[in-house]
Amino acid sequence: MLGQRTATIDPLPYLAGTLPYSIKTRSQTHSDLPASSKAQFKYEIYADARSAAWGDSPLLSWQTPTAAIAGKKITLAWVAASTADEAAIAALIPKPAPGQQLDPSQLPRGLSSSINLKPQISVDGTVVATGPGMRAGTEPIGQGGFTRYGQQDRDETQDKLIAGQQTALGVSI
């Protein structure tokens, strides 16, 4: 051995998390990420494919952070647009004989196009967005997607919907 060195150990405070440096300046602090930095999920319903392609105003628009819907059930339901439409739907359902159950084969196969339905998006059974009424059987376009991390553009897909047909929105987070 040619030489010998001994390490000098600085006596630090009790916890290593307290460094011997002082704070010179502080930028803004956040208790949460700003909305522009959060990944978002957006779902919109357009009257037709042309409206969706040209960027016209959607009939329904809903946006939420992806963290808020992780592991939750998201559904698109079509409900009666007015009390008159609700009464028309109720009139189509047959009344079972006293003491008997309703036979599902007696239910109507469809709804009249004179009945107006409005789209509702629900998260775990709570309605979060409602659109305007449209005739049963109308085929609007659903468009949904996520923001890409670090960017404001979206990775979107389109679905052909049918007013009156229940739809589950599959969100893979």
Image (cartoon, helix red, strand yellow):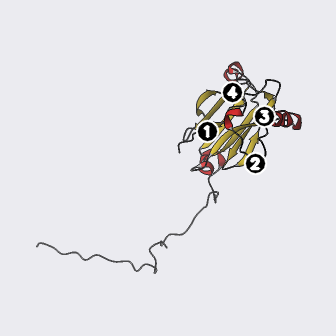
Front: mark 4 or 2: 2
Q: Which residue is mark 1?
A: 169
The mark nearer the N terminus, 1 or 3, is: 3
Q: What number is the disc on residue 162? A: 4
Q: What number is the disc on residue 99? A: 2
- Residue 128 vertical position relative to residue 106 in the rendered view, above or below: below
Point out the image quarter for the N terminus: bottom left
The mark nearer the N terminus, 2 or 3, is: 2
Q: Secondary structure at mark 1?
A: loop
Which residue is at a point 68% across and 41% down the rendered structure image? 63
Q: Which residue is mark 3?
A: 118
Q: Provide residue 132's location: percent of width, then percent of height.
A: 81, 33
User: What's the residue type where badge 3 is placed?
Assistant: Lys
The mark nearer the N terminus, 4 or 2, is: 2
User: What's the residue type where badge 1 is placed?
Assistant: Leu
- Alpha carbon distance from label 4 to label 1: 14 Å
Q: Provide residue 41's location: percent of width, then percent of height.
A: 62, 41
